[in-house]
Amino acid sequence: METFVIEPPRRLNLPRWAILWRARDVVTRLAQRDIIVRYRQTVLGAAWVIIQPVMSAGVFSLVFGTVAHLSSDGLPYFLFSLAGTLAWNLFNNTLTRASGSLLQNQALVSKVFFPRILVPISTAASTLLDFGVGLGVAIILLFVYGVNPGWPVLLLPVWSALIAVIAIGVGLVTAAMTVKYRDVGYVLPWATQILLYASPVAYTISSVPSGLRWVFEANPITWFLEAFRWSLVGTEAPPLWQIGGLVVFAFGVLFVGVVYFQSHEREFADVI
C-alpha cells in the first residue's frame, strides 16, 4: 500500500514532480472524458472543430478584408485570418476551459486526494486536439493557395507550445480565483473578447495607426500571433526581442500561475 506524507508547504510550494508523475493517469482520464462529453449528442459532432475556426476566419475576412479593405501582407485574407484565428483559439480555449475546470470537477476536488493542479492542466489536451485538426485544414489551404512558408514552418510546434504554456499559466491563476470568486467566470469572457479585437488576430500591425502601434507591439498576444503566422503562412519574421520576450513571458506566466495555484490549493476543498 502506498503511503502519502502530507508536509507543510515549502517556501514557494511548488508541486512535487514525482507525485505529479504518479498521478498522470488523472490527466489522461480527465482529457478523455472532456473530449468524449464535449461532442456527445451533437448533430455535427466533431465537425465543430473545423466549422468554428473556418467560420470565424470567414467573418474576419468579410469584415476586415472586404468591407474595411485592410492589408493582409499580400496573402489571401481568409488564409491570413485563419492563421490568426487558430493561434487565438488555442490560447482562448485553453484559458477558458482551465479557468472553469475546478468548478466542473467539484466532487473530485473535494473528495479525492490528488494534485489539483492536474485538473486545469488536463484541459490542454482537448484544446490541442482541436487545434491539430484546425491546423490540418490550414495546411491543406496552403497547397490550395500555393503558399510556401519555408523553413520557419519547423518552428510551428515551438510557438504552439508557448501559446499553450501562456494559457495554462493564466488559467491556473483564474481557476484558483474562480473557486472563491465566481465573478471571474463572468469577467473572463468579457476580457478575452476585448483582447481579441485589441490584438492583431485578423489584421496586420501595419494597419494600426503609427501613433498606437507601440501599444500593440508591446502586447504579448501580438508576439505569439506574429511568430505563429511567420511559421504557418510565411509573413515577415517578428523582431528578435519579441521572440525572446515571448519565451521569457511564457515561462514567467507559467511560474506565477503554478505558485499562485499551489498557494491556494489547500482552500479548494473547503470553499468549492
Image (tube, rainbow, N blue to C red):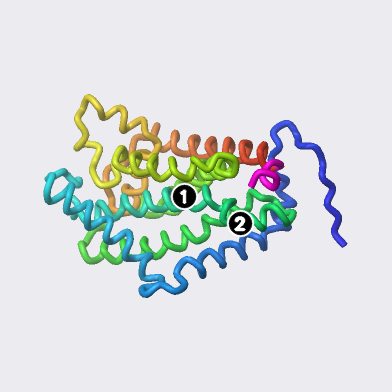
Give the x, y percent position of residue 166: 49, 43
Mark 2 and 1 residues: CB-CB less than 8 Å, in contact? no
At label 2, the amino acid type is Asn
Residue behind mark 2: 105
Residue 254 in view of the camera: no
Left-right relation of 221 to 176: left
Residue 90 sits above or below residue 222 on the image: below
At label 1, the amino acid type is Thr
Give the x, y percent position of residue 152: 36, 50
Give the x, y percent position of residue 204: 23, 41
Residue behind mark 1: 96
Taken as a whole, is the magenta stretch helix, strand or loop? helix
Name which residue lies at 66% across and 50% down.
116
Name which residue lies at 22% across and 66% down.
144
Q: Quadrant of residue 137?
A: bottom left
Residue 210 sits above or below residue 147 on the image: above
First along the sequence among labels 2 and 1: 1
Residue stretch in magenta? 266-272
Mark 2 surroundings: few (<14), some (14-19) or many (≥20) residues within 10 A: few
| Front residue of 140 and 240 | 140
**The N terminus - image quarter:** bottom right
238 inside magenta stretch: no
